[in-house]
Image: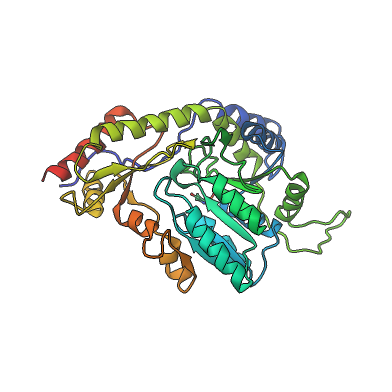
Amino acid sequence: MKTTQPRMYLSPPHLGTFEMEYVREAFASNWVAPLGPNVDGFEGEMASYVGSQAALALCSGTAAVHLALKLVGVGEGDAVFCSSLTFIGSANPILYERAIPVFIDSEPASWNMSPVALERALQEAEQLGRLPRAVVVANLYGQSADYDPILSLCESFGVPIIEDAAESLGATYRGKKSGTLGRYSILSFNGNKIITTGGGGMLLSDDEEAISKARFWATQARDPAPHYEHTEIGYNYRMSNILAGIGRGQLRVLEERVEARRKVFSRYKEALGGREGVDFMPEAPFGRSNRWLSVMTIDPTKASLRPIDVIKALEVENIEARPVWKPMHRQPLFAGCRYYPHQPELSISDRLFAVGVCLPSGSNLIAEDQERVISAVLKTMSC
Ligand SMILES: *Cc1c(COP(=O)(O)O)cnc(C)c1O
């Protein structure tokens, strides 16, 4: 029996009251271009919010990863280490540059890159004389990775970090804001992220010269000349002034969005956490998550059902739920790529993929709708 309830999404956009002011201003001043005062404003406001020296607004988070890889000099045949448990946007740009991804497993405390696996991978790479050009570290579902050990490893091997903070804007790591922990950090404003511009991204760094170079590449690599002169490959990666206006309005309410998502998470945990075999994504003591997505785990050996049963049962109620990201080392696209599990015989990301369920987590999810999700989950557990 199909429900007549409206669809409940995993992470829908949540617009506020400030966005229209900026968009209206762009219309009024005829700034409808991939540049303009909203773009400058959004870059400056984001840089000062996270505490970085420079920012470049782009058309997607994936474009930001691509430019970060170019800035560290990734080229054909280079190895690039990358979190395995992440969205494809972290990894696809490695292939754009014909580099070779090597995937690193998660650790259980944060579900993010395992420093133990990273160390093994770096040691082996050094022995083979194939140290990576960069390590792309994703901050999963709103929680920062454990950067202290990751940074000290990368420093000792001389490898720069690209922080993929697409999911973790508003989170912190030991008091530092997500988006400041890599040599280059990237954000996404895709429609499902904690704040959105409909589609967009940003590249952040303290290296202003590098950001200028990325700006040049992102604007078709136009050499300074009165005519159009090009000596390097460029991209059309800039964000439009209209969308940047939406971003400026969204950034003003980011803290509220974080609070709302954290509240959604604690309501799920309170209502479902005590069940046999049911658990939730942990929050590691080193930081504060923005709880972008609330992720529940179901251990099928203890609970009487599998994660997929819950996802299907919610679908019947017109509620969107999904497994956690399928690890990159399991993707057909990356067949044959090297993978370093947390322990030689223990792959954490594979286990999380088998047990994890992402539940509707929007900051605009009202308590009444969340109750619908909770009772649908409870129903599957009792039968
Ligand atoms: C969303 C996301 C991206 C890509 O961002 P787009 O703006 O969609 O290109 C990259 N990495 C992670 C971890 C993401 O969740």
Residue at image location 76% in from the left, 48% down from the top: 212
Q: Is residue 279 visible?
A: yes
**In x, y percent, where is residue 280?**
32, 41
**Lateral position of residue 337 relative to residue 9, left or right:** right
**In x, y percent, where is residue 187?**
57, 45
Q: Is residue 83 visible?
A: no
Query: In terms of depth relative to the viewer, which is nearer, 328 or 244?
Result: 328
**In x, y percent, where is residue 364?**
39, 31
State whether residue 52 is above or below residue 253: below
Figure label count: 0
State whether residue 50 is above or below residue 214: above
**Lateral position of residue 141 relative to residue 312, left or right:** right
**Lateral position of residue 29 relative to residue 252, left or right:** right
Farthest-out residue, left: 383
Quadrant in the rendering for residue 32:
top right
Residue at image location 49% in from the left, 69% down from the top: 338
Quadrant in the rendering for residue 292:
top left
Query: In terms of depth relative to the viewer, which is nearer, 261 or 302?
Result: 302
**In x, y percent, where is residue 98?**
61, 70
Residue at image location 41% in from the left, 33% down from the top: 261
Residue at image location 53% in from the left, 65% down from the top: 102
Query: What kind of colouring is applied to the model shown?
Result: rainbow
Farthest-out residue, right: 226
